[in-house]
């Protein structure tokens, strides 16, 4: 087997490890948002259908606090996991290179400050990941607040409001992890708040792959005395864009 073939195999095998890490991060970080949904459910369950202005404002204030705490915890947790992931990714990249050459030529050289900068400066669709969490927090607060106000104004029951915001119950139970503890709850589908969860998953997925690719590129740059070229290898299937497919094989 050639050096290039061994390298490709190593990269593909490691991509599976990255996908597993991503899924684990999503389960752990989205857990804060699922806990938030449960807290909002309890707050609405404890409130009568007809609310006076003062009581409604107090309820909305409590909901806002729950949303802020959940998103800040999720943002901090994601950053913590990525800080642990970055040095592991550098070591994995050097190992793939060394294994393909069957010689110890590469070694990790990035400092802790450099790895931290990769995590903190990584962009998701042109903005910092931390900024995306702040936007997501604001959007979620806006959706939930308007949903409650709309429901109260139209005389809906709390059950109807919860269904629109949190989704309808399926009669099945699901578990999620938050803060190292496993929680059990009634599974819900649909609802406005599910949009926030999907957006959070997208931020997590993009952040993981941005950190991985940035660390990998920096490792190559730190070893330009050995590396002569970088070859693009695309998976040619129905999900591959024409642009990425056109790069396949280019050096």
Image (cartoon, rainbow, N blue to C red):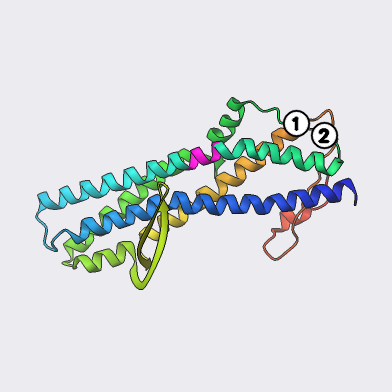
Is there any visible trace of residue 128 in the rendered image?
Answer: no
Residue under label 1 = 107
* Image: 220 above or below 49: above
**Disc 2 to disc 1: CB gap under 8 Å:** yes
Residue ID for mark 2: 104
Considering depth in this image, is 62 or 54 the residue closer to the camera? 62
Image quadrant where residue 155 sits: bottom left
Image quadrant in which you'd find residue 192 = bottom left
Q: Position of residue 221 (x, y in %)?
A: 75, 31
Is 32 placed left or right of 13 in the picture?
Answer: left
Q: Position of residue 235 (x, y in %)?
A: 74, 58
Q: What is the magenta segment's predominant secondary structure?
A: helix
Please state if 84 lies on the left or on the right of 223 as rendered: left
Task: Say which residue appears at 43% left-offset and 55% top-offset.
Answer: 197
Q: Is residue 96 visible?
A: yes
Residue 190 lies in quadrant: bottom left
Measured from the top left, where is residue 170 in percent x and y?
A: 36, 73
Query: Disc count in the image?
Result: 2
Q: Give the spatial CA distance, label 2 vs label 1.
A: 8 Å
Residue at the image point whose x is 46% and y is 53% from the top: 199
Q: Residue 181 in the image: x percent, y percent?
A: 40, 51
Magenta stretch: includes residue 40: no
Is residue 57 found left or right of 173 in the rendered image?
left
Give the residue drawn at x 45%, y 49%. 29
Label 1 residue SS: loop
Please report the bounds of the magenta region as a residue range: 78-83
Name the residue nearer the viewer: 222 or 185: 185
Residue positioned most to the bottom: 171
Residue 210 position (above or below residue 51): above
- The residue depicted at 68 percent of the width and 51 percent of the height is 15
């Amino acid at each position: 087997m050639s050096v290039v073939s061994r390298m490709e195999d190593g990269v593909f095998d490691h991509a599976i490890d990255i996908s597993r890490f991503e899924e684990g991060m999503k389960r752990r970080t989205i857990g804060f948002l699922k806990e938030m949904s449960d807290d909002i459910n309890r707050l609405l369950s404890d409130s009568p259908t007809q609310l006076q202005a003062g009581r409604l404002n107090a309820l909305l204030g409590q909901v806002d606090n729950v949303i802020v705490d959940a998103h800040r915890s999720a943002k901090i947790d994601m950053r913590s996991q990525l800080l642990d992931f970055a040095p592991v990714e550098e070591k994995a990249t050097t190992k793939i290179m060394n294994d393909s050459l069957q010689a110890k030529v590469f070694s990790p050289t990035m400092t802790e400050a450099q790895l931290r900068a990769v995590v903190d400066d990584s962009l998701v669709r042109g903005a910092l990941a931390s900024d995306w969490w702040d936007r997501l927090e604001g959007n979620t607060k806006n959706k939930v607040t308007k949903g409650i106000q709309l429901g109260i104004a139209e005389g809906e029951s709390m059950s109807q409001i919860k269904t629109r915001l949190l989704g309808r119950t399926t009669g099945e139970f699901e578990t999620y992890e938050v803060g190292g503890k496993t929680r059990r709850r009634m599974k819900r589908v649909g609802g406005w708040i599910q949009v926030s969860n999907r957006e959070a998953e997208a931020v997590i997925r993009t952040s993981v792959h941005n950190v991985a690719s940035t660390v990998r590129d920096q490792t190559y740059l730190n070893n330009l005395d050995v590396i002569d070229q970088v070859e693009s290898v695309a998976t040619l299937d129905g999900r591959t864009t024409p642009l990425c497919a056109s790069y396949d094989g280019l050096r």
